[in-house]
Image: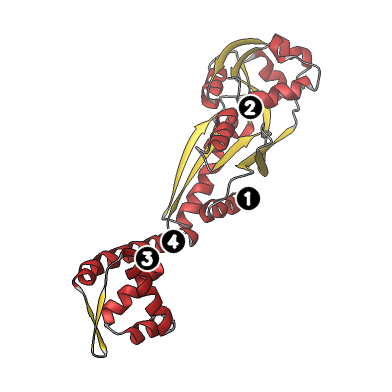
Amino acid sequence: MTLEQLRVFAAVAERLHMTQAARALNMTQSAASAAVAALETRHGVRLFDRVGRSLKLTEAGGVFLPEAQSVLARADAAALALDDLAGLRRGAIALAASQTVANYWLPARMAAFAASHPRIALKLTVGNTAQVAQAVLDGAADLGFIEGEAASPRLAPSRIGSDRISIYVAPTHPLAESALAGAPLELADLMDLTWARREPGSGTRSEFDRALAARGVDTASLRVALELSSNEAVLEAAASGDLAAAVSDLAARSFVAAGRLQRLRFDLPERHLQMVTPRERTRSPAVAAFMARAQER
């Protein structure tokens, strides 16, 4: 039994006329007759009786008609749902983002997309860079947003913005005054600092480690007092005592504006904010639309 056979049967049953049904379906009368005959033969039941030049539903045909109409209605609803999804009239996107991107870059883009596509549901999960990459690989997220580079060759990265890691201390820290005077921080000074750091797997931590390794500094030799799992916790720890923190300029902006942190002069390379997608997974129209919005400058 095919949907085409059901459509022909329903059209004939509603009109009780083969020629009129065929015309309504834009097919030949012989094709319509063949479809009904195939249905009857397949199931060993007669659906119509011919009375003169007219057709009449048999008892079996009368019982079968509402069932066929129900199936056709559900098929039409399914087709409409696909049309809605393709036309961005409904759908859902699962996003995963590392903390810096999730807190300081992504919300404005999500709000703009939601305003343009109010029936597309957006769900955001926040983790560190390693967790975000794994969520995309596992299929738990359609799109991932990270700092730095994608660790897996199965992920396709696209640059969406930039940021920089800097070293911050409280204004009362001994090095804050020299920073205000324009004195740069030396590599040897890093070893004298006591640090609050992000956890392993964090993009912020990985980028800082790579930048120092390029200058011959092993960050394992740094004196670390606290290891914390969020930018806000690291910033708060640095602002509240004599600890140094290497964090995103985006994340530290509000602390600097409030006079709670001072940026030390120590040049670190710019880092990329990346959108990552699985290379081998088909993107829905909704996901493709969000990607386009995220890549707008």
In the rendered structure, find residue 295 and report the number of the disc placed on it.
1
Characterize the local packing of mark 2: few (<14), some (14-19) or many (20 or more) Cα atoms within 10 angstroms: many
How many angstroms separate mark 4 from mark 2 (CA)? 40 Å
**Residue closest to the far left:** 59
Which callout, 2 or 3, points to the residue nearer the camera?
3
Q: Amino acid at mark 3?
A: Asp
Q: Which residue is mark 2?
A: 204
Q: From the viewer's perspective, is the residue at label 4 or at label 2 nearer? A: 4
Q: Is residue 214 visible?
A: yes
Question: Residue 257: in sight, yes or no?
Answer: no
- Compare marks 4 and 3 and give the one earlier in the sequence: 3
Instruction: Determine crowd level at label 1: few under 14, some 14-19, many 20+ residues with C-alpha closer than 10 A.
Output: some
Q: Is residue 233 left or right of residue 205?
A: left
Q: Using the image, tell me which numbered label, if any, was put on residue 49.
A: none
In space, the residues marked 4 and 3 are separated at their CA atoms by: 12 Å
Q: Secondary structure at mark 3?
A: helix
Query: In the drawing, what numbered circle is on residue 84?
Result: 4
Residue 226: name its quadrant. top right
- Which amino acid is tagged 4? Asp
The kind of residue on which mark 2 rests is Thr
Q: Quadrant of the N terminus?
A: bottom left
Q: Amino acid at mark 1?
A: Gln
Q: Nearer the viewer, mark 4 or mark 3?
A: 3
- First reached walking from the N terminus: tag 4 or tag 2: 4
- Please tell me which residue lies in front, 25 or 216: 25
Identify the mark nearer the N-term, 2 or 1: 2
